[in-house]
Amino acid sequence: MSGHSVSASEANLPPLTKGPHSKRLGQVAVVATLGGLLFGYDTGVINGALLPMSEELGLNEKTEGIVTSSLLFAAAFGALFSGGISDKFGRRKTIMGLAIIFFLGALACSFAPSLGLLVLGRVLLGIGVGGASTVVPVFLAELAPYEIRGSLSGRNEMMIVVGQLAAFVINAFIGNVWGHLDGVWRIMLAICAIPAVFLFIGMLRIPESPRWLVSKGRLDEATEVLRQIRTEKRAEAEAKDIQRTLEKESTMIAPSVSSMLKDKWILRIILVGVALAVFQQFTGINSIMYYGQIVLQESGFSKNAALIANIAPGIIAVVGAFIALWMMEKINRRTTVITGYTLVTIFHLLIGTAALVLPTDSAARPYILLLLIVGFVGSMQTFLNVATWVLLSEIFPQQIRAFGMGFAVLCLWLANAAISFAFPSILKAVGLNSTFFGFAVINAIAAFVMFKFLPETRGKSLEEVEVGVTTGAIYIVKNK
């Protein structure tokens, strides 16, 4: 069996076909995923900006951790509150509001005269990043036909890594050309304002989520939106399918924390979402994405060489994301995630061993470690990053989707922030080898947890996933 099961409602849906509506859906995805690009650039730019910033502002390991993690702690709160805001005001208006926050945050960082104001600007950016990480994947999942939902939702993660690669390339260029100038890091941070403007303007012409419109009783508007991105017959059939599911679900569960805790299947899917989110951060991927230049200097590269070498993990991240999008509709989500944690564990062990046994004065040491780091980042991006965000956008039932996604992503950002705050101090205290051996242990545990508890969602509509989650059936068929 291919694992592509079809619900009764899906069997009645007209098949997905190509046409002008396909192009329109592609346009919507490109504009919305500019939020992912901003997410990637804002989290990745610190990688090259941190050292010149530290020299100008006199930062140490602790204050470097504060500057880096302030964005991430703020992202946790952006993720938590943006779900509720998008439920009230709509996905589209929320994304436009986030574009304004991105723009203001970029300007605040680039003109900050002191550490305090810089952290304030990073907090603004964090709210934008956290909001985008929650709302954009849900928006894409709610617009996508079930047949291509994985690859369409996964485009956001691809844009995140494109944004991070753009940050690495721009940092390397600016650092090597204008690195001798004071305040070079301000230029790196200011560039983020440009895609924020494009996101705001682009969203003016993008339709609202049809599922959100149906949830507000606006069936005619939802059908009209679906007609833009589906064939006529498919649009009408899907609108009715969404309405039936929402009506049925409204009698099953109220979107309150107390009622969710009483329903064992809803509680279980929330815990699965939290595990997906937190373990993704404990891969240590952002120790490379945020502190790559520092890690590569620890490996033996010079300051400027590390800035250039840093582009290699960025490139492999983008390549991995493209492969991941291709795999989304061909390989089961469970298989992808379990494979990812297994590979990441192996590469952590190899990085730790190489850092331990290779002499620090060895000419080969920095290049061997770079190769292993590239392997780790490639494994992470190919098997885990896209799959994690796609799963988070599709495993929660409609009425608790904003809460479930928001809470899981809140936990993700808190884990991200904690690791990012502690990493410079841990690296200094125990060294490269012990740090990555620790990551290996955590990821071996993650592989076991995913094998035991992760359900399968590939080939199912959001409506079918909802029925499977609320009845527990999705767990029974997970190993087929």
Image: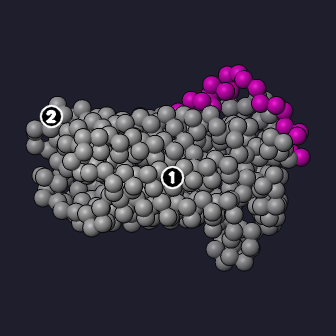
Residue 218, visible in the rendered structure: no
Q: Secondary structure at mark 1?
A: helix
Amino acid type at circle 1 is: Ile
Asked where in the image residue 402 lies, by quadrant, the reply is bottom right
Q: Secondary structure at mark 2?
A: helix
Q: Given the image, on which type of amino acid does mark 2 rest?
A: Trp
The circle drawn on residue 178 is: 2
Foreground pick, 422 / 256: 422
Q: Which residue is mark 1?
A: 346
> Does residue 398 sit above or below 365 in this rendering?
below
* Horizontal side of residue 251 vs 428, given as left or right: right
How would you classify the magenta stretch by its main secondary structure?
A: helix
What stretch of residues is rendered in magenta?
8-30
Instruction: Residue 114 in the image: state x and y as whole percent.
Output: 15, 58
Is residue 170 visible in this depiction of the protein? Answer: yes
Local packing at callout 1 (Cα closer than 10 Å; few below 14, some 14-19, many 20+) is: some
Seen at 78% across and 55% down, the residue is: 479
> Which residue appears at 68% of the width and 71% of the height?
267
Check the image and report above or below for 64 versus 167: below
Question: Decide: marks 1, 2 in contact (CB < 8 A)?
Answer: no
In the image, is 339 to the left or to the right of 50? right
Looking at the image, is mark 1 or mark 2 nearer the viewer? 1
Label 2 neighbour load within 10 Å: few <14, some 14-19, many 20+ = some
> What residue is drawn where x is 68% and y is 27%?
21
* Image quadrant where one finds the N terminus: top right
Scheme of image coloration: one colour
In the displayed structure, would residue 400 be above or below residue 106? below
Q: Position of residue 11 (x, y in %)?
A: 88, 40
| Mark closest to the chain's N terminus, 1 or 2 | 2
Q: Residue at x 72, y 57 (%)?
A: 455
In percent of width and height, residue 106 lies at 30, 46
